[in-house]
Amino acid sequence: MAYLLALDQGTSSSRSILFDQDGAIVAAAQQEFPQLFPQPGRVEHDPLAIWQSQLQTCRDVLQRAGIKAGELTALGIANQRETTLVWERAGGRPVYNAIVWQDRRTEALCEQLRERGLADPIRRKTGLVLDPYFSGTKLRWILDNVPGLRQRAEAGELAFGTVDAWLVWNLTGGRLHVTDVSNASRTMLWNIGQSCWDEELLQWLDIPAALLPEVHPSSHLYGEIDAAHLGAPVVIGGIAGDQQSALFGQACFAPGMAKNTYGTGCFMLTHTGERFALSQNGLVSTAACQLGRRAQYALEGSVFIGGAVVQWLRDGLHAIRHSTDVEALAQSVSGSEGVIFVPAFTGLGAPYWSPAAKGAILGLSRGSTVAHIARAALESIAFQSAALLRAMDRDAVAPIAELRVDGGAAANNMLLQFQADLLGIPVVRPQITETTALGAAYLAGLATGVFRDTGELAARWRVERTFEPHMPRERAQELIAEWERAVQCIRPD
């Protein structure tokens, strides 16, 4: 029996999941770590908390499964993307907290770059919208605001990486400073068409090249972890940003195949094959998981506040005690009765890209209750995701026949039925919804010969439930129009 260990390092927790050679889950372990909010609009993580929590879940999952590290064929890593870390090459000490993808502190820097006329050149090179979301301006902020760092970076004393690079550095005792193409494509420093770090991008953002990791395909024999961590050396065979890993785990290998992950945010990707297509409708182009030398691409739309709106209902409004209670509360009313919730707590992401937008609840009446607000909150997740798919349809790279879904909120049947009704296409939930971790395991398995090819992986994908659209298209279009009017009300730009 071949065992594959997937490290799923997320925004609020670190997880490890052990899969067997059939893609079945053998055991899982999870550990939350603190979220740091030093100022409004700023979100940070302790890099050591990321590393220690991830390592502990690796040890825990092996103990629960009753196997030793020597029995593992390989491990793969999926990680929160864009989150930016800098550390000392000599001893691996972080020089600043990790700046999380949700952080908005670099909006002023982005505006300066826009005023210099660089938004379009950056988009053509990277496929990305010039926004604080991505790593490049976060890295620039660290170099500009921590005394002495720029000089040390130029002297080659420091290393930059997204979370995957940080984990690999620690797993290998600093022997490997590497990342994969999918994570590199989220930095705003990677030329996505030429598959290389771009000298002009580095110049525009004032980033020393000495900071950067080596870049490899997502499925690749990166090296072995130090035996001291788990008791035996283990091959690292796969690395991918979490959303590209989920696209891979959903067996979306062909152009036009799409998935949506309902997590803290929502992330919709549609595969575009070997074609690098620039969106004309507010999406970003990104590298999909790469197996060999041929680049693979995807269009992506990111919703900043997806499942996090349910957390706000729980922790901010105290409307529910547990996140899982939201479906019953929302279903206690037949509809939202005109209430529309736009959860722009950290601005609006794709396809609107309005960083200054603020959240709002509109359409309240004397008869509105917390149940109507809860229903509108769930519906906001579907409305935002529908805006992404409509943008993908307008880009017309390939027709999207169905939407495969995963993530925590994909367990909510009411949400998925409403999503299908808005989209007018089937929404399909697989039997294994841990697709982010599964994708990392598949990448590692391909690199080490556990699996032959993607055809074998596609044959393993199984449907748990399909949600067919039932709402008349005219009614769906009316609801979408109401949503778009509400969005315009809260946009200052």
Image (cartoon, helix red, strand yellow):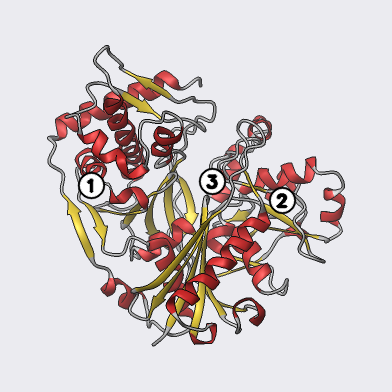
Q: State left or right for residue 59 relative to residue 189.
A: left
Between the residue at mark 1 and the residue at mark 2, the CA separation in whole angstroms equals: 45 Å
Residue 89 vertical placement versus 267 (above, below): below
Q: State left or right for residue 313 relative to residue 230.
A: left
Q: Residue 155 at x, y = what percent?
A: 87, 58
**SS for callout 2:** helix
Q: Which residue is labeled 2 in the image?
A: 202
The reply to whether residue 440 is visible in this rendering is yes
**SS for callout 1:** helix
Q: Nearer the viewer, mark 1 or mark 2?
A: 1
Give the class, few, some or many, for how many residues have Cα within 10 Å of label 2's Cα (few <14, many ≥20): some
Q: Which mark is residue 128?
A: 3
Residue situated in front as seen by the camera: 425 or 9: 9
Between the residue at mark 3 and the residue at mark 1, the CA separation in whole angstroms equals: 33 Å
User: Residue at the spot x=63%, y=62% of the render?
Assistant: 51
Residue 126 vertical placement versus 365 (above, below): below
Q: Earlier in the sequence, mark 3 or mark 1?
A: 3
Q: Which residue is labeled 1 in the image?
A: 413
Give the class, few, some or many, for how many residues have Cα within 10 Å of label 3's Cα (few <14, many ≥20): many
Residue situated in front as seen by the camera: 194 or 414: 414
Which of the 4 image quadrants contains residue 328? top left
Q: Amino acid at mark 2?
A: Leu
